[in-house]
Image: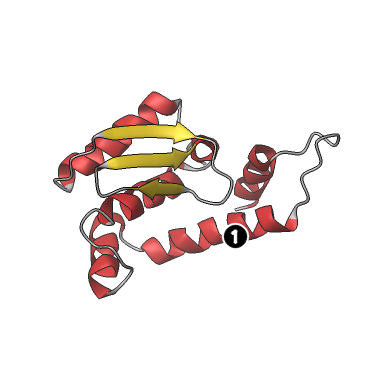
Amino acid sequence: MAKWKDKSEFKACVHEYATRMNIEVRSLALRPMKNKWASCSTDGNLNFNKDLLDIDKELGKYVIVHELLHFNVPNHGKLWKSLMTAYLGDYEKIELKLKKIVKSQSNVQVNKNSGKSIKKNLQKQMNRN
């Protein structure tokens, strides 16, 4: 599993894909997010869940491309799927891995006293794949 070195490497990847896709990113942030991997606005603002730094780059690239495509394609229809394939190849396989992580997160009760965290659970799930 190849992980991100740091947030600057992740951000560089976002800008690289944005350039390839001819998309202007006005602001880019990594922050804690409870229910999403990422969000974007029509103003060119991108927010990514900081937990993406702790999972496989392949999954992070899926989220990056997914969000960037929403600047031009607002839904997940045929065009969006075609573009995902063009940029990532068999994106559906990557999507399934990401869904497994989300499912494992929802099955884990996070207890402050137990020391468990989403980050640790993500790492465990990725090591199983």
Camera-nearest residue between 42 and 18 = 42
Does residue 90 lie above or below 3 as drawn?
A: below
Q: Is residue 23 left or right of residue 112?
A: left
Does residue 57 lie above or below 101 as drawn?
A: above
Residue 70 image position (x, y, % from top left): 28, 56
Residue 10 image position (x, y, % from top left): 38, 33
Residue 76 image position (x, y, % from top left): 33, 69
Camera-nearest residue between 74 and 119 = 74
| Mark 1 nearby-residue class (10 Å; few <14, some 14–19, many ≥20) | some
Report how many numbered discs are placed on residues in the image.
1
Q: How is the image coloured?
A: secondary structure
Q: Label 1, on which residue?
A: 100
Q: Residue at x 43, y 45 (%)?
A: 60
Q: Is residue 27 left or right of residue 121?
A: left
> Element under label 1?
helix
Kind of residue indicated by mark 1:
Lys
**Residue extending furthest left?**
22
**Residue extending furthest right?**
113
Q: Residue at x 40, y 48 (%)?
A: 39
Q: Residue at x 30, y 40 (%)?
A: 45
Q: Is residue 97 left or right of residue 47?
A: right
Residue 51 image position (x, y, % from top left): 54, 38
Q: Residue at x 30, y 30 (%)?
A: 12
